[in-house]
Image (spheres, helix red, strand yellow):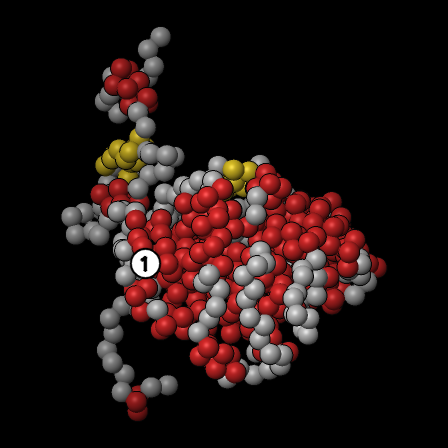
């Protein structure tokens, strides 16, 4: 039996239409139909413009506050399947990278698409290590901050300030220049972070030690006191390195989006990274790890967890470190982090807040409110506990996120710059404000 003939098409025409990768839209206001191509499971928002009420009409747009269902770019860097809890950098599962790679290897992979061979890794590590020093004048900026200034505020300002020391960074379409700024950004982030930390303690700055690993040197700049040579604890050094791997990129999150958006104006990468760092500072993004600790301290004891969860369910605050825009399953990074926590606690002693965190997780994973909304622990739920046990103050937690995320930001920025389809980011709006009206003189205003 022939299928029913639709809208004047023959059955064959209909079959051809059905086999095509297209979307047919009928505008019920005008009765007109248009066919829009589907590619990679998406339609182009610009294709909607042809849908018009009449010739004067601007054309249809899609309305998508906070980009819930809008792909901003084509990307080859990071793959996430939020339902299945999968995260891969350039095709490699995060679990394998965390087990077998170092942060610097991972950063290379994220930036250049392939794992480095031994020679490439040697050069890469050398180049990063030889760009760790910062201009002495940066210390003067740091001196200007109050002793209790938040290190993220200091980071944002000093990263932006780097652009004034390297004006050639404006040459963003020069590959050599981009590579140099990449070394500088990845190399100097730990130094800026450590100097900001030492400023808050009123301690003299500890300079980079080229003989140490990326994370080993960072620990040296943070914690070195009177010893002639700082030797990081290898377990803590590796734990931090794995945490850096887990934080290196996460596709189009708020800060990556800030990096791309600000970078799309063709500003230098230091200014764009300062913007991305500012985006990361927020409690809904990289600031969440700090908020988790504050929350656990406020809960105070395991016995008070049910009462706290009740308040969250009543809309009085959030269970920080839970939920994710993309993951509707256990965040794969959170699983790895739980293992690292055990190793760190073995050396540093168990964090007394751990029991409260575990109880929050246990109750939440069984509670209808969290189950129906598919809210699971995210990367930030356990990192704060580890960082605290390692001796970091809470205000440093988002900084520990920003350092490794720099490689992801640069990769996202470069991908955006080299994509011929990308232009300056400039969303549309649906204007719902007043129509033109007569100006009201002061004496007539209410
Ligand atoms: N505690 C309690 N309720 C929550 C939570 C939470 N942590 N997260 C989401 N919900 C509720 C939310 O109120 C909403 O409920 P309803 O449907 O009744 O209005 C529902 O779950 C959906 O949440 P949403 O706010 O629409 O989800 P989103 O995709 O806009 O937000 C999020 C994602 C991460 C901002 C959010 O889950 C959140 O605020 N979590 C706490 C902060 C946090 O841990 N952030 C770190 C994210 S992972 C690392 C990173 O990206 O930086």
Q: Locate the N terminus by quadrant.
A: top left
Residue 394 on image: x %, y %:
65, 68
Residue farthest to the bottom? 443
Q: Give the residue at x 27% y 61%.
A: 171
Under tag 1, what secondary structure? helix
Left or right: residue 132 compared with residue 6:
right
Residue farthest to the right, as pictured? 303
Residue in front for this viewpoint, 192 or 408: 192
In the rendered image, is residue 4 in sight?
Answer: yes
Residue at the spot 60% in from the left edge and 52% down from the top edge: 241
Residue 380 left/right relative to 363: left
The answer to whether any part of residue 250 appears in the image is no
The image shows residue 43, relative to residue 342, as above or below, that is above
Residue appearing at x 27%, y 83% in the figure: 440
Q: Position of residue 134 (x, y in %)?
A: 46, 71
Q: Is residue 125 above or below residue 40?
A: below
Residue at image mark 1: 177
338 or 167, which lies in front?
167
Image height of 104 relative to 88, above or below: below
Q: Quadrant of residue 401?
A: bottom right
Q: How many marks?
A: 1
- Name, please, the residue furthest toward the top: 1
Quadrant housing residue 86: top right
């Amino acid at each position: 039996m022939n299928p029913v003939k639709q809208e004047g098409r023959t059955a064959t025409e209909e079959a051809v239409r059905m086999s095509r990768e297209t979307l047919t839209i009928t505008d019920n206001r005008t009765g007109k139909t248009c066919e829009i191509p589907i590619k990679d499971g998406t339609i182009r928002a610009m294709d909607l413009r042809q849908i018009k009420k009449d010739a004067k009409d601007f054309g249809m747009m899609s309305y998508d506050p906070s980009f819930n269902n809008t792909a901003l770019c084509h990307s080859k860097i990071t793959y996430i399947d939020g339902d299945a809890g999968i995260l891969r950098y350039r095709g490699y599962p995060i679990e394998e990278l965390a087990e077998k790679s170092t942060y610097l290897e991972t950063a290379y992979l994220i930036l250049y698409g392939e794992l480095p061979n031994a020679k490439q890794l040697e050069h890469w590590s050398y180049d990063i290590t030889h760009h760790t020093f910062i201009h002495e004048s940066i210390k003067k900026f740091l001196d200007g901050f109050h002793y209790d200034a938040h290190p993220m505020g200091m980071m944002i300002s000093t990263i932006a300030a780097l652009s004034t020391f390297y004006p050639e960074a404006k040459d963003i379409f020069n590959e050599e220049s981009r590579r140099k700024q990449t070394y500088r950004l990845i190399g100097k982030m730990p130094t800026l972070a450590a100097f900001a930390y030492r400023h808050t303690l009123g301690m003299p700055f500890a300079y980079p030690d080229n003989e140490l690993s990326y994370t080993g040197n960072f620990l040296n700049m943070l914690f070195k006191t009177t010893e002639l040579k700082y030797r990081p604890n290898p377990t803590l050094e590796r734990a931090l390195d794995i945490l850096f791997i887990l934080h290196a990129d996460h596709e189009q999150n708020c800060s990556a989006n800030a990096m791309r958006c600000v970078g799309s104006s063709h500003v230098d990468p230091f200014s764009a990274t300062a913007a991305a760092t500012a985006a990361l500072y927020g409690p809904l993004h990289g600031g969440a790890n700090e908020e988790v600790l504050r929350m656990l301290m406020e809960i105070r004891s395991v016995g008070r967890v049910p009462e706290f969860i009740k308040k969250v369910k009543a809309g009085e605050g959030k269970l920080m470190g839970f939920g994710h825009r993309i993951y509707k399953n256990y965040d794969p990074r959170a699983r790895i982090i739980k293992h690292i926590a055990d190793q760190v606690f073995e050396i540093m002693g168990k964090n007394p807040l751990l029991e409260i965190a575990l109880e929050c997780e246990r109750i939440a994973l069984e509670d209808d409110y969290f189950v129906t909304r598919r809210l699971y622990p995210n990367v930030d739920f356990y990192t704060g506990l580890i960082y605290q046990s390692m001796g970091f103050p809470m205000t440093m937690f988002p900084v520990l996120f920003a350092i490794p995320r720099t490689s992801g930001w640069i990769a996202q920025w470069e991908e955006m710059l080299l994509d011929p389809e990308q232009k300056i980011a400039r969303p549309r709006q649906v204007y719902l404000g007043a129509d033109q009206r007569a100006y009201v003189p002061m004496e007539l205003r209410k």
